[in-house]
């Protein structure tokens, strides 16, 4: 089997001596719940990364939450000390991050010093699965290591997804 492509997220984990596992899926898949099924984990353990804008903020923030939930914008705004925040459109998210939707990763954006919010549901798992920074690749990383590396602010911002 060919050696997996080394992404910046993997280099960052290696540089910090953080263990991880790489999982591949069809890069055409963009639905986070289907990605979870494709890599063999529950939708609770696979976290998607969303880009959020807020009035008066210098730059957007990243929010990671379980793939089977939606973002409660009011709770996030309150956690950020803002009156209102808005989810970036797919086109804006790609323009702002330089990454494709479905491949946006907080680790791939470490050099940009973005604020990262992680939904508290992650604390229920020893490890969670996140994007490696490219569609088709996911990384399974210890939750505590991820929080420490990214300086995540833990928040309760996930709401059940409507069917």
Image (cartoon, helix red, strand yellow):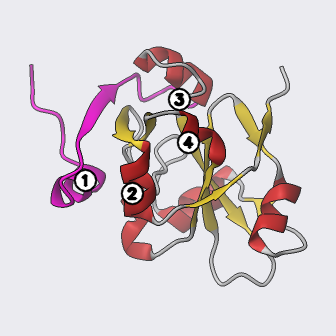
- Horizontal relation, residue 89 to residue 6: left or right: right
Query: What residue is rendered at 56% in x and 31% in y?
Result: 30
Q: Are marks 2 and 1 in contact (CB under 8 Å)?
A: yes
As measured in the structure, the alpha-carbon distance from the residue carrying label 2 to the one carrying label 3 is 17 Å
As measured in the structure, the alpha-carbon distance from the residue carrying label 3 to the one carrying label 1 is 19 Å
- Tag 2's secondary structure? helix
- Name the mark nearer the viewer: 3 or 4: 4
Of pointers 2 and 3, the one earlier in the residue sequence: 3
Relative image position of residue 68 (x, y in whole percent) = 68, 28
Pointer 4 residue: 123
- Name the mark nearer the viewer: 2 or 4: 4
Q: Are marks 3 and 1 in contact (CB under 8 Å)?
A: no
Relative image position of residue 69 (x, y in whole percent) = 73, 34
Of pointers 1 and 4, the one earlier in the residue sequence: 1
Query: What range is drawn magenta here?
Result: 1-30
- Horizontal relation, residue 133 to residue 151: left or right: left
As measured in the structure, the alpha-carbon distance from the residue carrying label 1 to the one carrying label 4 is 20 Å
- Name the mark nearer the viewer: 2 or 3: 3
Of pointers 2 and 1, the one earlier in the residue sequence: 1
Relative image position of residue 151 (x, y in whole percent) = 47, 66
Relative image position of residue 29 (x, y in whole percent) = 51, 26
As measured in the structure, the alpha-carbon distance from the residue carrying label 2 to the one carrying label 4 is 18 Å
Query: What residue is rendered at 46% in x and 44% in y?
Result: 103
């Amino acid at each position: 089997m060919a050696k997996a492509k080394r992404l910046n997220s993997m280099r960052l984990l290696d540089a910090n001596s953080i263990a991880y596992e790489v999982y591949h899926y069809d890069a055409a898949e963009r639905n986070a719940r289907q990605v979870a099924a494709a890599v063999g984990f529950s939708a609770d353990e696979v976290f998607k990364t969303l880009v959020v804008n807020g009035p008066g903020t210098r730059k957007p923030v990243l929010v990671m939450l379980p793939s089977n939930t939606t973002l409660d914008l009011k709770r996030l705004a309150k956690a950020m000390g803002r009156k209102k925040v808005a989810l970036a459109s797919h086109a804006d998210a790609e323009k702002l991050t330089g990454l494709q939707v479905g491949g946006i990763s907080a680790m791939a954006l470490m050099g940009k010093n973005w604020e990262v919010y992680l939904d508290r549901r992650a604390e229920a798992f020893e490890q969670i699965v996140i994007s490696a920074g490219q569609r088709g690749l996911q990384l399974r990383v210890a939750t505590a290591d991820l929080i420490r590396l990214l300086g995540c602010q833990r928040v309760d911002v996930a709401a059940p997804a409507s069917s």
